[in-house]
Image: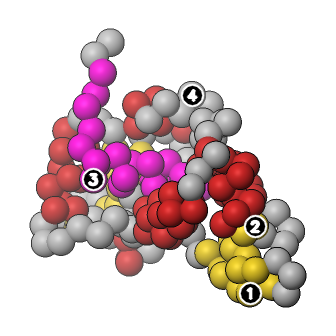
Amino acid sequence: MTQIQLSDAQAVILSTACAREDGAIFPVTANLKGGAVGNICKSLLKQALIEEMPATDFNTVYRHDEERGPLTLRATPLAYSTLGITDVPEDEVAGKPAPKTTHRRSGTKQEALIEMLRAEGGATIEEIGAALLWRSHTVRGAIAGTLKKKLGLEVISEKVENRGRVYRLA
């Protein structure tokens, strides 16, 4: 089987969709301008990494079809396997709605970072850096870039006495 090469923007859009419960492409959290989203979606449709389905929310409409009405886009099982997500539930393979829970690759530093921020009391930059063997600027970059911008997660920062600035997921 040939390996599908994805651009950075394609990978961001697909990974965000695969992280959602319904596998929806929209709303797109990537910071793209002009017709870039449309061009990326056309390319992903050609590669069968996403598929059209009836839209239930008018804020997520990709296009209108005279016969099928408003349509939106979602990730296909091929998208999950291209991204290395191997645990795609049977419902997704059968063409039914996407799974309620998404399965990501386990044991990654990103996953560890999210777990630390979800823990009661959150985590400081120093604690995260020590656990992941990252420098403080790398931790701040991962929080601002990957978690906030790419994954669309809300990270809360607050100053805690005797501990310093603590970060946690909302």
In this rendering, the label closer to the viewer, 1 or 4? 1
Q: Earlier in the sequence, mark 3 or mark 1?
A: 3
Residue 90 on image: x %, y %: 62, 31
Q: Give the extent of the magenta segment.
A: 3-24
Furthest residue toward top: 1
Q: Is residue 88 above or below residue 60?
A: above
| Amino acid type, label 3 | Ala
Circles 2 and 1 in contact, beta carbons < 8 Å: no
| Amino acid type, label 2 | Ala
Q: Earlier in the sequence, mark 3 or mark 4?
A: 3
| Amino acid type, label 4 | Thr
Instruction: Give the labeled residue for mark 2.
Output: 123
Q: Earlier in the sequence, mark 2 or mark 3?
A: 3
Residues at marks 2 and 3, CA–CA distance in whole angstroms: 30 Å
Residue 96 on image: x %, y %: 54, 43
Which quadrant of the rendered structure holds the C terminus? bottom right
Q: Is residue 120 above or below residue 11?
A: below
Instruction: Give the labeled residue for mark 4.
Output: 86
Local SS, label 2:
strand
Q: Earlier in the sequence, mark 2 or mark 4?
A: 4
Circles 3 and 4 in contact, beta carbons < 8 Å: no
Instruction: Give the labeled residue for mark 3.
Output: 9
In this rendering, the label closer to the viewer, 2 or 3? 2
In this rendering, the label closer to the viewer, 2 or 4? 2
Left or right of residue 168, residue 4 in this image: left
Local SS, label 1:
strand
Q: Which mark is residue 27?
A: none
| Amino acid type, label 1 | Lys
How many residues crowd mark 1 within 10 Å: few (<14), some (14–19), many (20+)? few
Residues at marks 2 and 1, CA–CA distance in whole angstroms: 11 Å
Residue 156 on image: x %, y %: 65, 80
